[in-house]
Image (tube, rainbow, N blue to C red):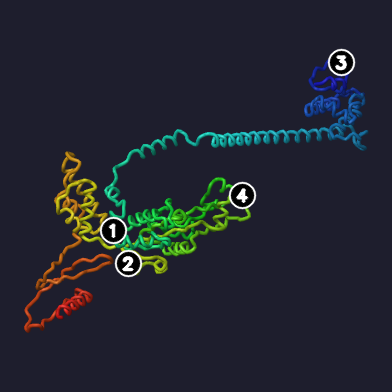
C-alpha cells in the first residue's frame, strides 16, 4: 500500500508492525495508546476508502501531509480534519472542544462517507446491471432486424404450411357441368337475342350507360354482361381498354357499417390504433385508406347481382360515387401538415380515389320495388323467361358438348320441370351421373334415358312447372286461366260444370266467391268476350 504512507511514521516500522494499512505512528506524550489507536484506525479506514496512493495525494493537496508526520497528537488530528472535511484552512482545534470530541466528529463524518460510498456503489451496480440488460435487449433487436432484412421470413413451420398449400393446389376435381357448359360467346346464349342487342347498344358505344338487367334467375344475366364487355373491348370506338376489368359482387353480401370500419364496395380508412395499418404507418400514427371495388372497377364494369337486396344507405352512397366518379376518404387521424405522410395517402385524402366505371346491376325483383333514384340513372334491359323450347334446346346443346347420347323425349321431360337454364343443366348432369353409376363403369359415355331423368326428378322431389296444357280447340265445361307472377305465367284450370240453358242465348254464370274477386272478374270478362 505504498511506501509513501509508510514514510509517515518511522517509529511504527521500528516496532515491527506488519499490518497492511498505512501507519502514522501515533504516540501520546503521557503514554496513552487509546487516541493513537483511534487515529490509526481512522487512517486505515480512509486508506480503504480512497486507496493508499490517492490518500497520500489527497493529504498533499490539503497540506496535511506534514501534519501527519508530526509527533504532535493535535497536529495529526488537524490533518485528519483537513482530509475528512476537505478544508485546508483548518489550523487548530475548535475552541471549547477537546481532542476526544474532535475525533468523534471525524468518526461521524467518516461513517457518513462510508454510508454514502456504500449507497453509491449499490446504485452504480444497479445502473451497470440495467445498462447491461438494455444493451443485451438492444443487441438482440438489432440482430432480429438484420435477420429480417437479410434473411428469409420462412421457417420450418411456414415452409410446411406452404408445401401443404401447393399440394392442395395440385389436387383438383374436374370442372363442374355449369362451368363446362357456360356460354363462351354471345351466339351460344339461348332465348335472349333481344336483350343482348339492347345491352350491346347501351354498352358498346362511345357513351356507355349504366344498366339494370331485369329477369328471372337462371336466364344468363351475369354471363351476358361479361360477354358484352368482352365484345365492347374489341371495338375501337368504345372507351373500354383491353385491360378493362369486369368486377362482380353479390349485392346481398354488401352491408353498410355505421362505424365505417370496413366497406369492401366503396373503400374505408384503417386508423393506426384500433384497426391497424402497415407497421411503418402505424408507428407514425398515419391512417391508411383501403380502396374498394369501385376503384378496382375503374375503367371497366362493376356488376352487382341482386341489387334489389342491397342496403339502402350503401346504395345511396354508391349513387353519389356514380355522379362524382370519385371516392373521398376522411379520418380524424389524418394530419395534412405531417411531413411523414406518404404522397399517395395525402393524394387519397385530398383528391379521393378514381371510380369511373359502368354499373351493370341485375335483379329478379319487379321494377316497382327498385330504388327510383337508381332507376333514373340507369337504362333498363329485360331478359325474357325461358320457354320449354328454350330449355329443350339448352339440354340438347349441353349433351352435344359433353358428347352424351339422349333419348328423344329427355329434353322435353326436363323442360317440364324447370324454366331455368342452370337448373336444366344440373338435372342433365345428375342423370348422366346416375347412368354412369348404373352402367358400373363399363362406359364413360352412357345413354341417358327417360327413366334416368325421372329418377333424378323423384329424388329431388320436383314437380312439373306446367301442370295443365291448353289445346287449340274448345271443350264444353273446361275453363283455363292464365296466372302471372313476376316474369312467369302458368295455365290454371278452373273447375267448372255446364248445364243446358232453359232458353238459348240466356245462360248465366254462377261463381263461387271463395275463389276470389280477381278470378271472378277474369271469368266474367272472358264470358263477355265470348258472348260477342
Label 3 vs 2, first from the N-terminus: 3
Residue 431, given in percent of the width and then of the height, sits at 19, 49
Image check: 526 left or right of 162? left
Residue under numbered circle 1:
219
**x 39%, y 60%: residue:** 203
What residue is disc 2 on? 366
Can you tell which mark lies on residue 340? 4
Which label lies toward us, 1 or 3? 1
Q: Depth-wise, is mark 4 or mark 1 nearer the camera?
A: 1
Q: Is 238 above or below relative to 433?
A: below
For residue 58, what is the image quadrant? top right
Comparing 24 with 162, the one in front is 162
- The tag on residue 397 is none
In primary-sequence order, the first of circles 1 and 2 is 1
Mark earlier in primary sequence (4, 1)? 1
Between 284 and 232, which is closer to the camera in this rendering?
232
Can residue 264 be seen here?
no
Q: Name the residue beneath numbered marker 3.
A: 14
Amino acid at each position: 500500500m505504498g511506501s509513501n504512507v509508510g514514510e509517515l511514521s518511522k517509529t511504527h516500522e521500528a516496532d515491527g508492525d506488519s499490518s497492511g494499512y498505512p501507519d502514522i505512528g501515533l504516540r501520546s506524550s503521557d503514554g496513552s495508546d487509546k487516541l493513537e489507536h483511534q487515529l490509526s484506525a481512522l487512517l486505515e479506514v480512509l486508506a480503504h476508502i480512497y486507496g493508499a496512493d490517492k490518500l497520500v495525494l489527497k493529504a498533499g493537496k490539503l497540506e496535511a501531509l506534514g501534519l501527519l508526520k508530526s509527533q504532535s497528537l493535535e497536529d495529526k488530528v488537524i490533518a485528519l480534519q483537513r482530509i475528512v472535511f476537505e478544508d485546508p484552512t483548518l489550523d487548530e482545534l475548535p475552541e471549547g472542544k477537546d481532542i476526544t470530541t474532535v475525533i468523534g466528529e471525524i468518526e461521524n463524518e467518516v461513517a457518513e462517507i462510508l454510508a454514502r460510498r456504500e449507497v453509491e456503489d449499490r446504485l452504480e451496480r444497479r445502473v451497470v446491471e440495467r445498462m447491461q440488460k438494455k444493451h443485451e435487449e438492444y443487441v438482440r433487436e438489432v440482430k432480429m432486424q438484420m435477420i429480417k432484412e437479410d434473411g428469409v421470413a420462412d421457417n420450418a413451420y411456414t415452409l410446411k404450411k406452404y408445401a401443404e398449400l401447393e399440394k392442395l393446389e395440385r389436387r383438383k376435381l374436374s370442372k363442374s357441368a355449369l362451368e363446362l357448359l357456360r356460354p363462351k360467346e354471345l351466339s351460344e346464349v339461348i332465348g335472349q337475342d333481344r336483350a343482348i342487342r339492347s345491352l350491346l347498344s347501351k354498352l358498346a358505344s362511345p357513351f356507355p350507360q349504366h344498366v339494370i338487367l331485369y329477369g328471372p334467375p337462371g336466364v344468363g344475366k351475369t354471363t351476358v354482361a361479361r360477354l358484352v364487355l368482352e365484345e365492347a373491348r374489341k371495338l375501337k370506338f368504345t372507351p373500354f381498354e383491353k385491360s378493362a376489368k369486369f368486377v362482380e359482387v353479390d349485392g346481398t353480401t354488401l352491408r353498410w357499417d355505421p362505424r365505417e370500419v370496413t366497406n369492401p364496395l366503396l373503400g374505408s380508412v384503417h386508423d393506426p390504433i384500433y384497426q391497424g395499418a402497415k407497421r411503418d404507418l402505424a408507428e407514425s400514427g398515419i391512417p391508411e385508406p383501403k380502396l374498394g371495388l369501385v376503384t378496382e372497377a375503374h375503367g371497366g364494369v362493376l356488376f352487382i347481382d341482386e341489387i334489389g337486396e342491397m342496403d339502402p344507405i350503401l346504395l345511396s352512397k354508391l349513387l353519389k360515387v356514380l355522379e362524382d366518379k370519385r371516392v373521398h376518404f376522411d379520418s380524424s387521424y389524418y394530419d395534412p401538415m405531417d411531413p411523414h405522410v406518404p404522397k399517395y395517402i395525402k393524394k387519397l385524402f385530398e383528391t379521393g380515389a378514381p371510380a369511373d366505371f359502368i354499373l351493370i346491376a341485375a335483379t329478379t325483383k319487379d321494377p316497382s320495388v327498385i330504388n327510383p333514384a337508381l332507376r333514373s340513372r340507369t337504362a333498363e334491359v329485360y331478359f325474357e323467361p325461358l320457354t320449354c323450347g328454350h330449355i329443350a334446346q339448352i339440354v340438347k346443346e349441353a349433351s352435344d358438348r359433353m358428347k352424351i347420347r339422349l333419348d328423344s323425349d329427355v329434353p322435353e321431360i326436363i323442360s317440364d320441370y324447370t324454366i331455368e337454364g342452370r337448373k336444366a343443366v344440373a338435372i342433365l348432369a345428375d342423370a348422366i351421373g346416375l347412368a354412369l353409376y348404373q352402367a358400373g363403369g363399363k362406359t364413360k359415355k352412357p345413354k341417358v334415358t327417360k327413366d334416368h331423368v325421372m329418377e333424378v326428378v323423384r329424388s329431388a322431389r320436383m314437380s312439373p312447372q306446367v301442370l295443365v296444357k291448353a289445346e287449340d280447340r274448345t271443350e264444353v265445361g273446361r275453363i283455363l286461366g292464365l296466372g302471372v307472377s313476376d316474369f312467369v305465367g302458368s295455365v290454371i284450370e278452373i273447375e267448372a260444370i255446364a248445364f243446358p240453358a232453359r232458353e238459348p242465348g240466356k245462360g248465366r254464370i254462377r261463381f263461387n266467391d271463395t275463389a276470389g274477386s280477381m278470378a271472378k272478374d277474369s271469368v266474367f270478362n272472358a264470358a263477355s268476350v265470348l258472348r260477342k
